[in-house]
Image (spheres, rainbow, N blue to C red):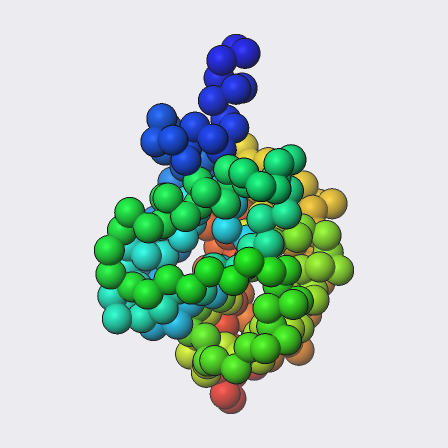
Amino acid sequence: MWTSRVMKHPFFAWAGLRLPIAQHTAAEHHALEKYALGCKSLVEIGVAEGASAIALQTTMDPQGTLYLVDPFHLSRVRMLNFLRRAARRAVSTKAGAKLVWIEAFSHEAVAVWDQPIDFLLVDGDHREEAVEQDWNDWHRYVIENGTVVFHDARIFPGGWTSAGYGPVRFVDRVFRNNPSSSWVIFKEVDSLVFVRRRERGSA
């Protein structure tokens, strides 16, 4: 219906007339909560209306820091930018962990980055080359037992992804079909793919 299409505009989330639109499934939300549990330094690339950031906030160490990287450049009216406003409203309603907003493209943000990361969510530009750049730029900062998560990176029953999706192509090429990789897939939930460093001595 016309009204439902209109209500999808981020203005209505900012105004408190609806909840943030999640671009992930309930199962993915729970998985983000599970693997962010106790993490102290989390980076999310691509924030949208903030629904996945809320999942991370829920279980991360309340003394930790959540870095939210997004240029919020897709707003038609930059002065108003209701997507940015909606995200800030959604995430700021939860008390606890420190929030650091980095309003820049991920390749710009990493140029001055110098912090260890124990949880990295890659959900920005979905072109394959952009996903690869995010991986190359950021994974070096992930600690030994840290987790990297790719969204929209797996085909699943009833899902929206396809073999042509950039994150799907990247994950298949670099992890799924690359037994020599020093990183391995350890969990998959709907479109989410979780990777971590291969244990030393394992095949």
Q: Is residue 196 above or below residue 17?
A: below
- Residue 74 visible within the image: yes
Q: Is residue 158 above or below residue 89?
A: above
Q: Residue at x 60, y 54 (%)?
A: 71
Q: Residue at x 46, y 50 (%)?
A: 189
Question: Where is residue 187 drawn, in percent x and y?
Answer: 46, 60
Q: Is residue 10 above or below residue 134?
A: above
Q: Is residue 123 left or right of residue 33?
A: right
Total marks shown come to: 0
Closer to us: 13 or 179: 13
Residue placed furthest toward the bottom? 201
Q: Residue at x 47, y 80 (%)?
A: 115
Question: Where is residue 184 drawn, in percent x and y?
Answer: 55, 71
Closer to us: 130 or 166: 130
Question: Where is residue 151 drawn, in percent x and y?
Answer: 54, 52
**Residue 18 found in image quarter:** top left
Residue placed furthest toward the front? 79
Q: Quadrant of the C terminus?
A: bottom right
- Residue 24 visible within the image: no
Q: Is residue 49 left or right of residue 182?
A: left
Q: Residue at x 66, y 73 (%)?
A: 136
Question: Where is residue 16 drawn, in percent x and y?
Answer: 34, 31
